[in-house]
Image: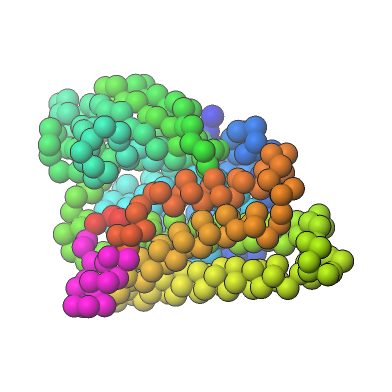
Amino acid sequence: MTLTPAAAARVPVLDAEEATLVARRQAAEIAVGAVERDSKRLLPVVEVRGLAESGLLAITVPPEYGGAGLPPSVVAEVFRIVAVADPNVAQIPHSHFVYLNQAVQQGTEEQKQQIFGEVLRGRTIGNAQSERGTAHVRDFRTTLTPDGPGRWRLDGTKFYCTGALLADRVAVLAHRGVDGPMAVAWVDRDAPGLEIIDDWDAVGQRTTASGTVRLTEVAVTDEWITPYAVMFDTPQTYGAYAQLLHAAIDAGIARAALDDAAEFVRTKSRPYPDAGVERAADDPLVVQAFGELELAVRAADAVLAEAGRALDRANGDLTAESAGAASLAVAAARAITTKTSVEVSSRLFEVSGTRSALAELDLDRHWRNARTHTLHDPAAWKVQHLGRWAVDRVLPPRHGQI
């Protein structure tokens, strides 16, 4: 189940304006089946293929390799737009963009030519990063074992492998040698020994296919391995970029929940008798609640946009200070979008009334999606890093989660 087009034609190269316009067109199509996909757990195969063929999944390929090299601020807005339609579809290519960024920073010239060339032909990347049963989320057991000059055997089991089931290539995070430095192995979807299992069973984000990847003596050569551990030895925005896209997904969930609540109140809710109005939408308490929710969503969107601009600035002049400032801006975006998406998707029912809880409407998907996706990284740690900076001007640590 891969997304490679039948013909190996190049996808369109989109500038910033075109990218947002195409994202809105794709989002309109994606939104049509969102409820059915969630309620029946139908994987968005066609929808993700549409993103790839539209050129949206190639917007960060650097210009020297034939792409537009669009900045984080534009990518985040694309993610937010798609997430309003369906955050599952938005999350699936998250790792695609994160590992393209890894290739930009750590790939050899030959690796970049190959990887970016594939993406410009519509091929996609999924991840095999996280593992269950280890000491913590940055503890890994998957290992590349030497198997002759320039050859390795890759063994391990991964979970939360978002996008892998629908991808053409899987980026696997592993030790190079037992307890050696971390590296990324770029494994072809059809490689012998690679098994991708659709066993994701969360309450929300049900159709991201974030299941298990098993690797049994998968053959990998040096040509398809990039270093990972060294990325955090110097100032970088790699982690902040990944977190920015997560924040964009949560912002999209919040806007979708608010829009659906407004539509429900306009068309289906009955007014409370004490309000003395004919429409629930004219109840002053309902209007006040919607004002509060709109304010929260607008604030989240504004902080997200500023975080994207902070990353753009840092990438243009990368220092410890600019990278730290970008990480803090993204930490703020992650904290506020986490809070807002959970709050709005919950208060949706408060403003809409009892009927909105009917299972056939599937409005609870917004809360389930928000609650599941916001567990990706603890928002409280984002606030801790912001607090340490506010008190003592301590910059956040260098790792992939801030």
In percent of width and height, residue 398 lies at 22, 61
The residue at the far front in this view is: 274
- Check residue 224 for magenta coloring: no
Task: Count how many numbered circles sit on residues in the image.
Answer: 0
Q: Residue at x 23, y 35 (%)?
A: 134
Quadrant of the image containing the N terminus: top right
Q: Residue at x 53, y 42 (%)?
A: 204
Residue 49 image position (x, y, % from top left): 59, 42
Front position in the image: 154 or 110: 154
Compare residues 384 and 149 and report the one nearer the observer. Answer: 384
- Residue at image x 65%, y 32%? 40
Residue 61 appears at what percent x and percent y? 44, 57
Of residues 180 and 153, which is closer to you in this image? 180
Figure check: 393 above or below 139: below
Q: How is the image coloured?
A: rainbow
Q: Is residue 239 visible?
A: no
Tell me if residue 298 comes above or below residue 12 in the rendering. below
Is 400 positioned to the left or the right of 67 in the image?
A: left
Kindly indicate the quadrant of the structure image that contains residue 191: top left
Q: Residue at x 17, y 37 (%)?
A: 176
- Residues drawn in magenta: 383-398
Quadrant location of the C terminus in the rendered image: bottom left
Q: Position of residue 72 (x, y in %)?
A: 43, 65
Q: Is residue 61 above or below residue 45?
A: below
**Residue 371 visible in the snapshot:** yes
Q: Most prominent secondary structure in the magenta stretch?
A: helix
